[in-house]
């Protein structure tokens, strides 16, 4: 006699359809949570210890995940670094756009450039870009996008302030503010601040001459500094 083979039937919901073992929405949420946790872990290491500390093992430890998931979600460590950079860069573009549309765009941009968290992150990716061409390409691409947005808005703003573009080209003013801010961040990181107060006073004197006294820090930055 042939043995009778019992075939298990799929679970049936109230509508008579087979119910999936795991709902797609839940699966997507779980994947999204794990992916975000890996990116968050990488960013924490980047800011606390520098890019050299961002290894697959340590990122996985911070995220409470298996290191093999880095290859699953990002393909490689380069892929993870690219996604981490893009995530921060897109957030930065949004913050910059809001800052430039504020009533005092020069003050808002200056405050944004002085954001230590943002600048510390930028410095690490600049250093990483020297060793990884794929990161260099991303940094260059987003730097151009940042600069174009600044030029588009501030060229009109500065003209409205009556500034002669031949004497003070908008691109030169933007680069001056960014370069000064970045140098101050680098030297502060080294524990060296000779001339910093004087340089800040000069830049802010010129901004004040165009926009008056700073009303307040840009809201996005004020909330970060108070946290």
Image: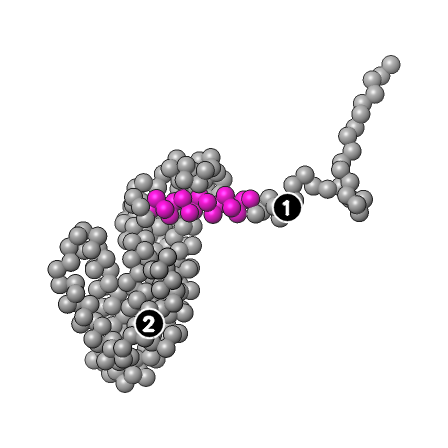
- The secondary element bearing badge 2 is classed as loop
**In this orientation, which residue lies closer to the viewer: 150 or 33?**
33
The residue at the point 76 percent across, 37 percent down is 11
| Viewer-nearest of discs 1 and 2 | 2
The residue at the point 39 percent across, 35 percent down is 57
The image quadrant that residue 195 belongs to is bottom left
Is the residue under label 2 in contact with that under label 1 (CB below 8 Å)?
no
Q: Is residue 40 magenta?
A: yes
- Specify few, some or many for label 1: CA neighbours under 10 Å numbering under 14, 14-19, or 20 or more: few
Q: Position of residue 227 (x, y in %)?
A: 37, 57
The residue at the point 35 percent across, 60 percent down is 226
Q: Is residue 62 magenta?
A: no
Q: Position of residue 8 (x, y in %)?
A: 77, 30
- Quick check: 171 left or right of 59? left
Magenta residues (range): 30-46
Name the residue at the right extreme.
Answer: 1
Q: Position of residue 28 (x, y in %)?
A: 58, 47
Cα separation, mark 1 vs mark 2, equals: 46 Å
Q: How many marks?
A: 2
The image quadrant that residue 20 belongs to is top right
Q: Which residue is mark 2?
A: 216
**In this orientation, which residue lies closer to the viewer: 190 or 145?**
190
Q: Is residue 142 visible?
A: no
Q: Position of residue 218 (x, y in %)?
A: 36, 68
Considering only order in the chain, which callout, 2 or 1, is on the residue closer to the N terminus? Answer: 1
- Specify few, some or many for label 2: CA neighbours under 10 Å numbering under 14, 14-19, or 20 or more: few
Specify how the rendered protein is coloured: one colour
Q: Quadrant of the N terminus?
A: top right
Q: Which residue is mark 1?
A: 24
- Quick check: 211 left or right of 167? right
Q: Vertical placement of 148 versus 141: above or below?
A: below
**In this orientation, which residue lies closer to the viewer: 119 or 198?**
198
């Amino acid at each position: 006699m042939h043995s009778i083979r019992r075939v298990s039937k799929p679970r049936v919901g109230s509508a008579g359809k087979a119910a999936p073992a795991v709902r797609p929405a839940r699966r997507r949420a779980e994947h999204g949570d794990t992916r975000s946790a890996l990116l968050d872990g990488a960013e924490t290491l980047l800011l606390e210890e520098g890019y050299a500390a961002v290894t697959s093992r340590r990122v996985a430890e911070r995220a409470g995940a298996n290191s093999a998931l880095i290859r699953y979600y990002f393909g490689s460590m380069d892929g993870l670094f690219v996604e981490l950079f893009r995530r921060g860069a897109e957030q930065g573009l949004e913050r910059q756009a809001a800052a430039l549309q504020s009533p005092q765009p020069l003050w808002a941009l200056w405050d944004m450039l002085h954001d230590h968290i943002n600048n510390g992150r930028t410095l690490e990716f600049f250093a990483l870009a020297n060793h990884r061409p794929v990161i260099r390409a991303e940094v260059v691409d987003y730097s151009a996008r940042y600069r174009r947005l600044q030029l588009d808005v501030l060229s009109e703003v500065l003209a409205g302030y009556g500034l002669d573009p031949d004497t003070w080209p908008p691109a030169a003013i933007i680069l001056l503010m960014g370069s000064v801010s970045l140098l101050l961040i680098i030297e502060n990181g080294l524990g060296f601040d000779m001339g910093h107060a004087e340089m800040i006073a000069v830049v802010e004197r010129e901004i004040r001459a165009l926009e008056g006294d700073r009303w307040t820090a840009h809201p996005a930055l004020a909330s970060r500094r108070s946290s």
